[in-house]
Image (cartoon, rainbow, N blue to C red):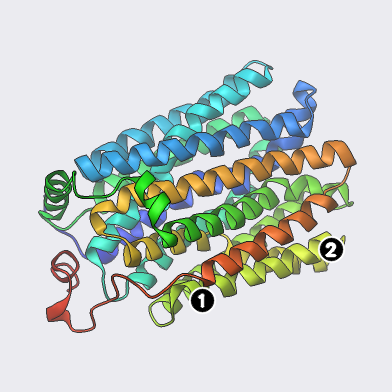
Amino acid sequence: MLKRDINRWWTVVGGAICLSVGAGVLSAFMFGMFIKAIAAENHWSRAQVSLGLTVFEFSMGPGTILLGSLIDKMGVRRPTLLFLILFALSTALVGVLPASPWIFALAFLAVGLFAPSTNALPYAKVICARFDHQRGLALGLMVGGTAVGAMFMPHYAGYLLMHFGWRAGYFGVAALMAVFSVPALYFLVKMPPGVDEELVRKTHAARHELPSLWTLFLNDHTFRLLGLSIICVSGVLLALLSQLVPMMTDRGETVMAAATMLSIAGSTSAVGRLFAGWLMDRVHAPYCAAMSFALTLVGVLILASGATSYTAMIAAGLIGISIGAEADIITFIVSRYFDLRLFGRVSGAMWMAWGWGAGIMIFASGLSFDLTHSYRIALWTFSVFVSIAVVSIMRLGPYVYPEQRDPKKRAPLAASTSA
């Protein structure tokens, strides 16, 4: 029974469930809730605490390339399931660590290495194989799972923090991942019958013909522009979300008010993702991305002006529209500009750019506060990076693999599963 095919939209549901309790939610909407508590208990600076998340983001880069390569060679399910189980276990491990910043950072090295199993990469490959028509909508709905998690995770983390402490918080989050993600991946995320094997066979047969990531970096203008835009915008978004709670409590807001701002960002991200997914099926995807990033720029500028209360909530809402948009953009644009046989590796490289940009800016924002006792310099710098992202993404050219409007002319892998 488990080998029988299912309706392709169940794959969207399964991916959304996995992302709702995945690495994006963990890093953006939970870690920030625990920063002050970890710093107070261990007598660390915010930069020291933020170093854990920086290591997490950096190690997620090579972890994504590793998982992407394994998926291209072995298929989606087996390597993703292994990484998913190890991700939950390593997250729980953080809750029992001794008070050493180096051990803390080392634990997040493991968390980040296995985190790509709960990012969009594996689930998006299945969706791109199942969808040609409505691909943007399917990806938007799938990534929308992160928005659902974003709406509830800050309050779940806040409840655990207030009643049990930050250590139990990590146990609670790890348990939530295991309970929801493993069954969703195993029962719902399925390639069409025979397609995974066909892709693996074709990838193996063409292993000497397909370009390496280094060759793409040197010779492919699209690869470089997309990577630059992802580095810039992801770094700003993750740094903002990881520091939003301490930033707003420094400005006099309560912890719960700051958590509400995170929830607002999560709520608007749901709308933004669905709209972006729908729009990318109708409008050139880089233009959709540029519009999304421009709204983030407005939100950053509002926060840089010292906003509090309702004005800060508006800024959080504007920023939220772009949260996760990079996941739609990475997966959709990669599927339209690169051979599907390279999907895992190219997407992995883009997620590495995403993680490294986030890691650098998360640590830099914490360091900026430690040096200046304010996030103002970091916020104005963020506005420059978002501007670079807007310009870079708009310079992408026409699709290499556009949607085939005539079902009879569609690529075999997509056409065979689009019914």
Residue at horizontal 42%, vertical 47%?
349
- State left or right for residue 180 relative to residue 250: left
Whether 391 is drawn above or below 220: the answer is below
| Extreme-front residue of the structure | 219
Q: Position of residue 295 (x, y in %)?
A: 66, 71
Q: Viewer-proximal residue, 292 or 30?
A: 292
Q: Position of residue 134 (x, y in %)?
A: 32, 75
Dot 1: what SS? Answer: helix
Quadrant containing the C terminus is bottom left
- The circle drawn on residue 287 is 1
Q: Viewer-proximal residue, 263 or 43?
A: 43
Residue position for label 2: 309
Dot 2: what SS? Answer: helix
- State left or right for residue 226 relative to residue 414: right
Q: Position of residue 35 (x, y in %)?
A: 72, 36
Whether 218 is drawn above or below 317: the answer is above
Amino acid tagged 2 = Ser
